[in-house]
Image (cartoon, grey):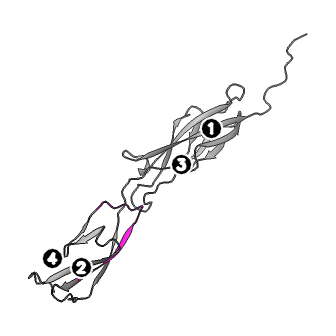
Amino acid sequence: MDRNDGRTKYVLRGEGAGSVFVIDEKTGNIHVTKPLDREEKDEYRLVATATDRQTDRALEPSSQFIIRVQDINDNPPIFDDGPYSAIVPEMANIGTSIIQVTATDADDPTYGNSAKLVYTLVQGQQYFSVDPQTGILRTAVPDMDRETQDQYLVLLQAKDMGGHLGGLSGTTTVTVRLSDVNDNPPRFTQSE
């Protein structure tokens, strides 16, 4: 109905109309006025109407539409329950499960790899390993002796984007304490 003669006026109503979104009342072009954050609001429902500039009567039925905010990788992984503490018996077999750490990412898990997390060890690789997908921390050596060293500080990282370059990361610590097992026989302090 718009004949480009200046008689048509476009009006926008709905969520964010006039504040987040503005409409050019002459052309009907809609513009965003400020940055959008999908984690705050992921969609906006709007109604646009073409009206007669002099009478304000609708020239045709209003158009209803939804603007969906596409996610970008703008949130790092967070370990909500960290720092962690765990106990494992000394001399445990290689691969003994110690604890599972879990990070969360506020980015959209259904779009791209922004929320696809990969776990790695930053500190403690000589004694421990971590499953990159599950975050399960395991022993990597069989001979950790509590009488030699009874505690280890492990630094774990969760990186989004599937661990690829450009991903954001978060870290947490796990304090691993070795519990005692009966591995030392009694000894007399004097032989006679």
Distance from label 1 to label 4 (Cα)?
A: 64 Å
Residue 22 vertical placement versus 74 (above, below): below
Mark 4 is surrounded, within 10 Å at the Cα level, by few (under 14), some (14 to 19) or many (20 or more) other residues, namely some
Extent of the magenta region: 34-49
| Amino acid marked by disc 3 | Phe
Q: Are marks 1 and 4 in contact (CB under 8 Å)?
A: no
Identify the residue under disc 1: 175
Question: Where in the figure is residue 188, as x and y percent of width and height?
Answer: 87, 17
| Amino acid marked by disc 4 | Lys
Label 2: state its secondary structure: strand
Distance from label 4 to label 3 (Cα)?
A: 50 Å
Distance from label 3 to label 1 (Cα)?
A: 15 Å
Going from the N terminus, do you reach mark 4 or mark 3 first?
4
Label 4: state its secondary structure: loop
Question: Where in the figure is residue 163, as x and y percent of width and height?
Answer: 43, 46
Q: Nearer the viewer, mark 3 or mark 2?
A: 2
Question: Where in the figure is residue 140, as x and y percent of width and height?
Answer: 61, 36
Going from the N terminus, do you reach mark 3 or mark 1 first?
3
Identify the residue under disc 2: 11
| Amino acid marked by disc 1 | Thr
Q: Is residue 41 magenta?
A: yes
Label 3: state its secondary structure: loop
Residue 30 vertical placement versus 160 (above, below): below
| Amino acid marked by disc 2 | Val
Label 1: state its secondary structure: strand
Residue 23 vertical placement versus 60 (above, below): above
Going from the N terminus, do you reach mark 3 or mark 2 first?
2
Residue 79: mark in rendering: 3
Distance from label 2 to label 1 (Cα)?
A: 60 Å
Distance from label 4 to label 2 (Cα)?
A: 10 Å
